Amino acid sequence: MSGPGDFEIGIGLQSDKRAGDYARLGRLAEEHGIDVVSVFGDLMYQPPIFPLLEIAAATSRVRLGPACLNPYSMAPYEIAGQLAALDLASDGRAYLGLARGTWLGEVGIAQPRPLTALAECAEVVRRLLAGDTSGFAGELFSLAPGTALRYPVRRARPPLLIGAWGPRGAALAGRVADEIKVGGSANPAMVPVVRERLRPGAEEAGRSVDDVGIVLGAVTVVAADGAAARARARREVAMYLAVVAELDPTAEVPADLLARVKAEVAAGRDDAAGRLIPDDLLDLFAFSGTPEQVAAQARRLIDAGVRRVEFGTPHGLTDDDGVLLIATEVAPMLRKAAR
């Protein structure tokens, strides 16, 4: 388990910005002590490799990675190539996030056997980066003997993160990953649940469950005007509450409340949907409020054993203002509390 001073602070960026914006935000985060900058891999947004390469060129310390790529819309050999490129461009600061992917049915991509796909994708990437030419015959993916990357790589094994909520995905992370990310959660009660779900895979691989860092990340809105920040967060959370509430076994969300929120969202009344979400429920699925409120939420996760807290989009009432407040006010409060 992570100790009270053993944690990282991360920023998660949506890839919907103009060229130059990513470099500016990455520099801002790095200059003020943020440890990790992730770029989301959501459907129909810019591919994460573009923002990540821009951030790599503008920074020298922060770890960087996509959170997450999936093995259905991108072949494992291509994932290996993009990871190798990012690791080279960042001088060994890249990590790879893998998840099954979401909403791919909207572009006609099926997602059969997701656990097998993730496990085999991770193995193909590992073998390619390590220069292993012995071949691999999986059920979904394979490498013919002698197949190798035709360019040098910076590191043979950049860290692997698996994005998962459920027991089987967590067990896979316990077996093969360096980190597991539970996306859309700010709930400290999920930390012991995730740790126990990691355990079967970790034990199968002969590892300690504490070898796998637990990452929790969620919508973040931080502002000097805490009420405005929480109102914005309520609107954001309303759009995915029904999904994450069903994934969190510790959250007791009344079915009638979920139904009302879904109905308002479906009707395009996001503000009305957000107003239905009470404070205690909001705090399970978003970081929001003043810097002091957001730091207190993150501190509860760190105390529960999270290795990294990832503050996600939209960060604040504007991206720049939110990232600045997280870096200059929230992060220092967390560091000071850990000393």
Image (spheres, grey):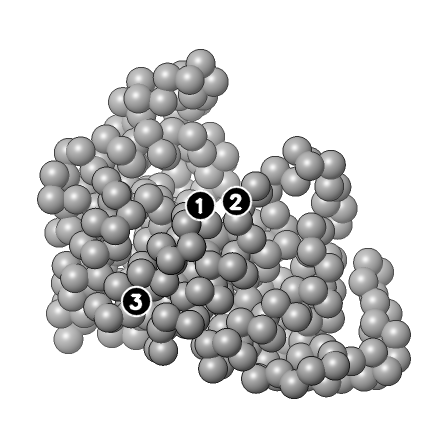
The disc labelled 3 sits on which kind of residue? Arg
Residue marked by disc 2: 45
The disc labelled 2 sits on which kind of residue? Tyr
Mark 1 to mark 3 CA distance (whole Å)? 18 Å
Residue shown at the point (88%, 74%) measured from the top left = 144
Mark 2 to mark 1 CA distance (whole Å)? 6 Å
Residue marked by disc 3: 27
- Mark 2 residue element: loop
Can residue 324 be seen in this snapshot?
A: yes
- Mark 3 residue element: helix
Pointer 3 local density, CA inside 10 Å: few below 14, some 14–19, many at least 20: some
Q: Position of residue 244 (x, y in %)?
A: 46, 38
Q: Are marks 2 and 1 in contact (CB under 8 Å)?
A: yes
Mark 3 to mark 2 CA distance (whole Å)? 22 Å
Earlier along the polypeptide chain: callout 1 or callout 3? Answer: 1
Q: Position of residue 89 (x, y in %)?
A: 50, 76
Residue marked by disc 1: 16
Q: Which part of the image, by quadrant, shows the N terminus? A: bottom left
Q: Which part of the image, by quadrant, shows the C terminus? A: bottom left
Earlier along the polypeptide chain: callout 3 or callout 2? Answer: 3
Left or right: 84 in relation to 127: left
Residue shown at the point (14%, 39%) measured from the top left = 226
Left or right: 157 in relation to 186: right
Residue shown at the point (55%, 67%) measured from the top left = 96
- Mark 1 residue element: loop
Earlier along the polypeptide chain: callout 2 or callout 1? Answer: 1
